[in-house]
Image: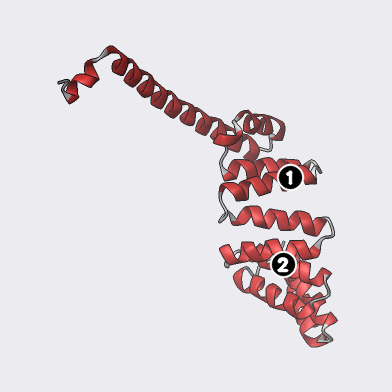
């Protein structure tokens, strides 16, 4: 009767193990290579070398791309005005990581830019749920509500944005606008004054 350990000494099994180990090692090497490419692409993106950054990101096979890779590809395409392609990339980022609040936020920005405030609201709400302390998500959600004429909801989001980050002049300006729409002239005047002070200090 063949002993169990003898299986590992027959030539066929030895060859199978060699191929398996080689495959594991090469996969690991490829993963490290893609990580290095991703890091280089991030550095180029941060340095505003958009063309070379995009080329590097696109050289990473789709199955190896991270949510951040998809997001930055989307950012580049959005900056180039290729909004449909950017939406596709942001959705790929979400498929990769459905807790990636930046992708929802960027989708909201595209929909707001594209005069689709209802769709923008949906995406900003997801971003806010995942990252409640993200002031710009509250601010842009407020802007989407302004577009829809929902001024009370806009007021709440803009106040939240200011509570989180009170040094952004536009937050105060838009809140003043909302108070004006709500016929609260005194509050509108107060936030315009805050806006003017912040602009003077810039």
Residue occupying the point 64% across, 52% down: 103
Residue occupying the point 45% across, 27% down: 27
- Whether label 2 touches label 1, CB < 8 Å: no
- In the rendered image, which quarter contains the N terminus? top left
Is residue 129 positioned above or below 74 on the image? below
Of tags 2 and 1, the one toward the viewer is: 1
Which residue position is annotated with label 2? 141
| Secondary structure beneath label 1 | helix
Residue 150 seen from this side: yes
CA–CA distance in space, label 2 to label 1: 20 Å
Is residue 109 positioned above or below 179 on the image? above
Q: Quadrant of residue 104?
A: bottom right
Name the residue nearer the viewer: 192 or 74. 74
Q: Residue 200 appears at what percent x and percent y?
A: 75, 66
Name the residue nearer the viewer: 36 or 117. 117
Q: What crowding class fits label 1: few (fewer than 14 Cα within 10 Å), some (14-19), or many (20 or more)? A: many
Point out the residue furthest to the front here: 1
Q: Residue 92 appears at what percent x and percent y?
A: 64, 45
| Secondary structure beneath label 2 | helix
Q: Residue 20 appears at what percent x and percent y?
A: 37, 23
Which residue position is annotated with label 1? 86
Q: Residue 66 appears at what percent x and percent y?
A: 56, 41
Q: Which mark is drawn over residue 73?
A: none
Q: Is residue 16 left or right of residue 31?
A: left
């Amino acid at each position: 009767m063949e002993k169990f350990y003898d299986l590992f000494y027959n030539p066929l099994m030895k060859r199978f193990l060699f191929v398996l180990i080689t495959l594991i090692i090469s996969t690991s090497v490829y993963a490290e290579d893609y990580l290095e490419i991703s890091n280089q692409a991030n550095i180029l993106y941060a340095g505003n070398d958009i063309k070379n950054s995009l080329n590097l990101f696109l050289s990473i096979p789709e199955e190896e791309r991270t949510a951040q890779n998809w997001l930055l590809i989307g950012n580049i395409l959005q900056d180039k005005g290729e909004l449909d392609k950017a939406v596709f990339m942001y959705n790929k980022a979400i498929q990769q990581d459905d807790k990636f609040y930046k992708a929802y936020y960027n989708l909201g920005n595209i929909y707001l830019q594209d005069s689709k405030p209802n769709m923008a609201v949906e995406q900003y709400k997801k971003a806010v749920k995942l990252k409640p302390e993200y002031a710009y998500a509250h601010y842009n959600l407020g802007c989407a509500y302004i577009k829809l004429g929902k001024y009370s909801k806009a007021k709440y989001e803009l106040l939240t944005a200011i509570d989180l980050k009170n040094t952004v002049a536009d937050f105060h300006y838009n809140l003043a606008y909302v108070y004006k729409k709500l016929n609260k002239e005194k509050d509108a005047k107060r936030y315009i004054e805050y806006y003017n002070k912040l602009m003077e200090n810039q």
